[in-house]
Amino acid sequence: MSSSPTLSLPGGRNAALLQGAGFTAILAALLVVPLAIGNDFVTHIFITMCLMAALSTAWNLVGGFAGQMSLGHGVYYGIGAYAGVILMNMGISPWIGMFAGGLIAMVVGVVISYPCFRLKGPFYSLASIAFLEVFRVLALHFSSLTGGATGLMIPLNLGWTWMVFRERWPSLVIIFGMLLVTLAVAAAVRRSRLGFYLIATRERESAARAAGVQTVRVRLIAVAISSFLCAMLGTFHAMYLTFIEPAAMFSLTFSIQIAMFALIGGLGTVRGPLLGAVLLVPITEWARAVLGASALGLHGFVYGSVLILVVLFMPNGIIGFLSRYAGKQNAEDAAPATTQTDTIKAPATPLVPPAPDRAGIGADIMRVEHLNKHFGGLHVTRDISFTLREGEILGLIGPNGAGKTTLFNMLSGFLSPDSGSVSLRGPDGKFHTPANPADFAALGMGRTFQIVQPFAAMTVEENIMVGAFYRHHDEKAARESARETAWRMGLGPLLNSEARGLTIGGLKRLEVARVMAMEPRVLLLDEVMAGINQTDVRRAIDLMLSIRDSGVSIIAIEHVMQAVMSLSDRVIVLASGEVIAEGDPRDVVRDPHVIEAYLGKEFADAQA
Amino acid sequence: MLKLENIHAGYGPTTILQNVSLEVKEGEIVTIVGANGAGKTTTLRTIAGLIKPKQGSISFCGEDITRLRGDQVVDRGITLIPEGRQLFGDMTVRENLLIGAFRAAARANHERRLDEVLSIFPRVRERLDQAAASLSGGEQQMVAIARGMMAQPKILMFDEPSLGLAPIVVSQVFDIVRQIAGTGTTVLIVEQNVYTTLKVADRGYVLENGQIVLEGQSEALLNDDHIRQAYLGI
Amino acid sequence: MTTFLQILVNGLMLGGLFAIVSIGLTLIFGIVKVVNFAHGEFLMAGMFITWLITTRLGLHPYAAVIIVVPALFVMGALTQRLLIQPLMSARDDHVQIFATVGLSTALINLALLIFGADIANTPAHGLRAPISLGPVRVLTGQLYIFGAAIALVVALHLMMKHSQIGRAIRAVAQNRSAAELMGINVNRIYILSFGIGAACVGLAAVLIAPLYPTSSNIGTYFVLTAFVVVVLGGLGSIPGAFFGALLIGMLDALSGFYIGSDLREAVVFGVFLVILILKPSGLFGNRRALSHLS
């Protein structure tokens, strides 16, 4: 999901302001234009626009932010519609009914999504379609409740209490209000910790888990909010239509449309779904009205074709297109890149704070005992035991395929060993044996990945914020902490750059920065120096020393021997899943076993 | 025969190879050695057409092949035996070998070629109708080499052929490399097993951080401290 | 007893129908790794062409096969070349999902624009006549479909197993980059495979058109079941799709009789969801089909 643009649009403040103003104007027009014209048909089109925009915005919480492509959001909309109408028939106002429907939809959403989140990409979509079909069939079957295929009429009680009106404008006012609420929710989610966690999970699930994100939980919260909103909109629409039936309420076509507007406008953005609906609904509604029956299917054909064209040529939707355009404009303004990032100021403190005197190596903080792991018939980890002491840098080296990364995965809870244990000393002074990445993170374990895992669609600052949110629940505090970390890591000038544009050296530093923002006590670094140039290697060495001096204990997998030699207090050499040597780095590299493991037996003999 | 000039290449925005130039002459065995992550595999994948270089050019037998697709490179007579074997595990050994002869020039007389190749690998002949995935690591490596030979390439490239194999199998693999070179096929080999490889090769290049830092006759390289330094930092 | 036997046979016949619709879908997924949400609309297009040929030219519907199958092959190949191939390298799932969802939406509505909302009945030419097989009766057309489904499975199996192009297709399906190293033009194999998958559904369209009324949404009706069948049988597995289809056909017929015809679909989709969530590799699939799980 690398393609959705970030909310903080690249391209500078002016362009962002301009876009904000344009967006507000569109939003105001949705209410003002139809009220000013006062024509029923026009009002109807605007009501449809507001409804589709709101549904699509709600869908976007799951489809865009969480990256789960639901094609069955009609389920929630339909539940809201039926709950509203059934309760109204019992004499309960839809204003109450919409909350009842919302709650039911929320429960349904969480229950059906929990097992489905295991499914990836199109298979999640398929499951969502299947649920939609099941609900449609059930609505047809339980006709005593739903009226079955004949559908349900609402009692004609007019007035604001019943949300049913003779004129159209009150409905417009209501749906406009609901649209504003939905947009506000989406904007709030996007800015909050939840929003960051959702996008991080969508971009790189394993990196998100390493940052302490409970990936299933955040997605369930997104589904709960989204389904609640959709159900409320469903209640409104039922009142507006005055008649509902299963085929229309649990419709696949309609569910696809909901998703489509978000996709066309800009997946995972706050403003995109509205833009998509505002652009497409009027064209097709107008065509439907003017061309009538001769154009049966025309609007659907337009939707389908636009969708194909957008996917092929504007994969980031209208918003992505606009921001790229704005970015170009800004570049042409020829302002130096840094002047745009006016909010970024180097902190008064020096970039690398003067290291407190090294505390020295303390007591054990991590114990690894008799770890074994098999993959199929392969014994990849053989009875590995070692300890890490507080404030120590432990180098982990060994030839390709020695099992270093497998070992790291077990040390951070991403893999569970076949036998043996990893225990960490918690802040309480006792040793704990965590079982999954979240538990490890809770005990202060942070790790990086050998293959860098940036959240590509986020800026550098936002990437680091994902880590910072682990300590700071408030967005401002997290941003503050992220900036501080960024400057410490030498990423300060790049705060507003998109992560995907960084060099490999920058990405490696970003990886470390994100983990450091979690304020870990134990840090696992997986080849943070691989593939970076000499200058960067020296910077990375200084960085690691300063991290160590702030009291963090480090295990580093590294191939750059220059770094291993100058950094490590101790070195462990792994070959074929076994510890073949351990001790002072200078002794270890002269060990004949080590030379043999690296260069072959004959070489060892020849040089002996 | 094969010539790389000032190649810059990498994945996505990252550049791994910087200004790599090397040459392989007909009938030679040439090796590229270097530490993990130095860019050895990237070099081979760039030659094979799986990665498009950002700068520089590759020519083969006088033809510019820089922009060719992977399958077109194979058609010209360059075959890569990839790291980790990459057999088609669900297919039988025979099917794997037949797929090896997909290249137009090899397809015509693949029956005869199969016999020739199998004469080098008697063990593979016994396993012809087994699923490739059911073979041991060493046997799989033999099948991978045999599959590469089925294409009747002018130059055969090996990526870490001894990775994960028992020492006795490793020496068999190197015997076979020698044997293949003996039949006139040019060989470009990337190996961690520096000593053995340099013993087999005529010439070698040392790759460090994506750059060629040393090149020369194998004998000279063997006695150069630089190699030891590149791998162990001492 | 006869009733039960009749239900079983009905289920079997229905299974044959589901099988012939599903084979192309599973083939495309197995090789190109794309779930073609427009698969049902390929079927619909094939049925409309069959209807046109049969009614305008007065031919036997089966004669349409010489036009429909090549036409659908071209349609599939073009879809791969123009729509899927440019998106193959996209890391984002949504791009490929919505490409075919968009195609599906466009095709359904294009059919509405051209043919209107009326139902198109392809003349049956006796294919809807029942024949007796011992104590049970089936429609002639159903029997042909069942036979054709078996023939198609066997033919595809032979092609995949014993031709060089079939081996190349399997190689690409198993390991794309290794296949490229063998000198196989991977993109061409994808185009070919998508074409073959679409041609299979073209054959299905010709056989189904005389039995079912054609309309713009007939594809949705069949394809949802086809998705169930394909997941049940293990994605990408052709024999799996065949046996999965028979199972679903039986389930459909039995639940229609014993639980009620209006809940039939709920049962089928319920089973689908249970399989998808609990045993996502399908009943007959192998571990490698797990590519859709995180």
Image (cartoon, rainbow, N blue to C red):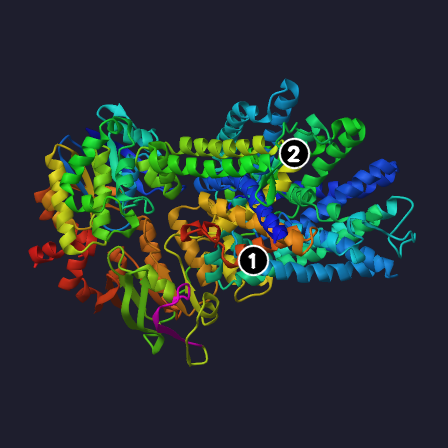
**Element marked by disc 1:** helix
Q: Where is residue A426 drawn, in percent x and y? A: 44, 76
Real-space Cα distance between discs 1 and 2?
29 Å
Pointer 2 chain: C
Q: Give the quadrant of the N terminus of chain B.
A: top left
Question: Number of callouts in the render?
Answer: 2
Q: Is residue A325 magenta?
A: no
Q: Amino acid at mark 2?
A: Ile
**Would you identify the image quadrant in which residue A231 lies?**
bottom right
- Amino acid at pointer 1: Val
At horizontal 64% and vertical 45% (from top left) the residue drawn is A259
- What's the chain of the residue with tag 1? C
Snapshot quadrant of residue C132: top right
Q: Is residue A414 magenta?
A: yes
**What span is colored magenta in the figure?**
A411-426
Percent coordinates x, y for residue B88 in the rendering: 32, 44
* Closest to the observer, C77 or A199: C77
- Residue ID for mark 2: C108
Q: Quadrant of the C terminus of chain B?
A: bottom left
- The quadrant where residue A90 appears: bottom right
Against A237, residue C73 (above or below) is: above
Q: Position of residue A393 (x, y in %)?
A: 31, 67
Q: Residue at x 67, y 37 (%)?
A: C217
Q: Of label 1 and label 2, which has the lower sequence position?
A: 2
Q: Secondary structure at mark 2?
A: helix
Spot occupied by residue A402 in the image (x, y as percentages of width and height): 26, 59
Please state if B205 lies on the left or on the right of A133 as rendered. Answer: left
* As drawn, C39 above or below A143: above
What is the number of the mark on residue C274? 1
